[in-house]
Amino acid sequence: MQNKNSTGITDSFLVDFIDGQAPKITLSKKPIAYNTEDKFFWRHMDYQNPEAKKILTKHYGISSDVAEALCDISTRPRYFHHKKGIVLILRGINYNPNAAMEDMVSLRVWVEQNKIITLSHNSLKAVSDLRELISSAEGLPTSPMQLFLLLAQNMSDSINDTIIDMLDETADVEEKILDADSLSDLNLRDKISNMRRDIIAIRRYAAPQREIFIQLQNDKWDALTEEDREDIREIYNDITKAVEDLDYCREQMSVFSEEMQSKVSISMTRIMYTISLVTVIFTPLTMLTGLLGMNVEGIPYAEKPYAFATVCAVMLILCGMLVFLMKRLKWL
């Protein structure tokens, strides 16, 4: 399901989870009052909102250091424990209109025992899908950590779905490479180069995310239940598989690129070899015809009626001798 946000900019909202009641979803970019009697709440924001840091520190009680990390423009996947909560920065596949999937969307997460705050600038499919799931009151998470793990699992599934498409494209490229006419496909080399760039771009963020879930699984944080740790292990396995598949695709693309280069080199060698043979055969004939074609006195048999036939016969014999010699030398 594609994200319905046509602008590509994330919606800001608050979800209140109250015991015995359906979750309440409120849309707003400004601070939203949450119910202090909530079981827990989920706040999602645009980290490029000029008021984002102020909202985090003054309205939701987050330290300025954590707020700075959550709103930093340039980030890479990371994880750290800060006093009563944890910070996780992940990347998800970009499904926004006119955006490249490998231009992955950054999701910043703060998790405490009674709240989870997520931030992104571009709309993220995993966030919109989870909000839609919550609005339908199906499979509701019972804690902030479970909500985060649902988000992480959705992001992991999106990465794996994208990589499955890459594996299919890799198999398609392999068939074309094995085709004898692959050199005539001018777009094949560009496709291989583009795929290599896409693989590198996705792996750049997928590999560090694998380490995040190792650290999270080993964290001694009291809010992590045994069920949470089992879910973390599953997500880690999914991301590990994604990285291994990316490595396979990357190695295959390297082999395909080398194969293409080898085919081009062999083809050029054959062409130059053929040209060299033609040159060897016709150089003596060209010299002979050049001598006989000179406009000077004394050309032998110039007035004889059989002179032309004799010259042709001599050239045929000379050509045959050259071919015989090249075969003896195993040039042909």
Image (cartoon, helix red, strand yellow):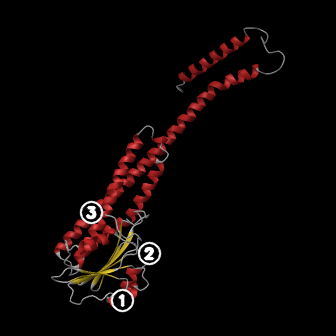
User: Does 103 sit left or right of 324 as displayed?
Assistant: left
Question: Is residue 221 depicted above or below 210 in this figure?
Answer: below
Query: In percent of the image, x 35 and y 65: which residue is there?
Result: 206
In space, the residues marked 1 and 2 are separated at their CA atoms by 20 Å
The answer to which of marks 1 and 3 sits earlier in the sequence is 1
Identify the residue position indicated by label 3 in the image.
238
Question: Is residue 165 depicted above or below 311 in this figure?
Answer: below
Badge 2 element: loop
The answer to which of marks 1 and 2 sits earlier in the sequence is 1
Task: Pinpoint residue 86: horizontal percent, then vertical percent.
Answer: 29, 80
Badge 1 element: helix
Quadrant containing the N terminus is bottom left
Identify the residue position indicated by label 1 in the image.
57
In space, the residues marked 3 and 2 are separated at their CA atoms by 26 Å
Does residue 218 appear in the picture of this structure? no
Does residue 205 appear in the picture of this structure? yes
Identify the residue position indicated by label 2 in the image.
74
Q: Residues within 10 Å of mark 1 (few under 14, many from 20)?
A: some
Task: Pinpoint residue 67: horizontal percent, then vertical percent.
Answer: 37, 84
Question: Is residue 300 depicted above or below 290 in this figure?
Answer: above
C-beta proximity under 8 Å, tags 1 and 3: no
Q: Which mark is residue 154?
A: none
Q: Amino acid at mark 1?
A: Thr
Badge 3 element: helix
Q: Quadrant of residue 283?
A: top right
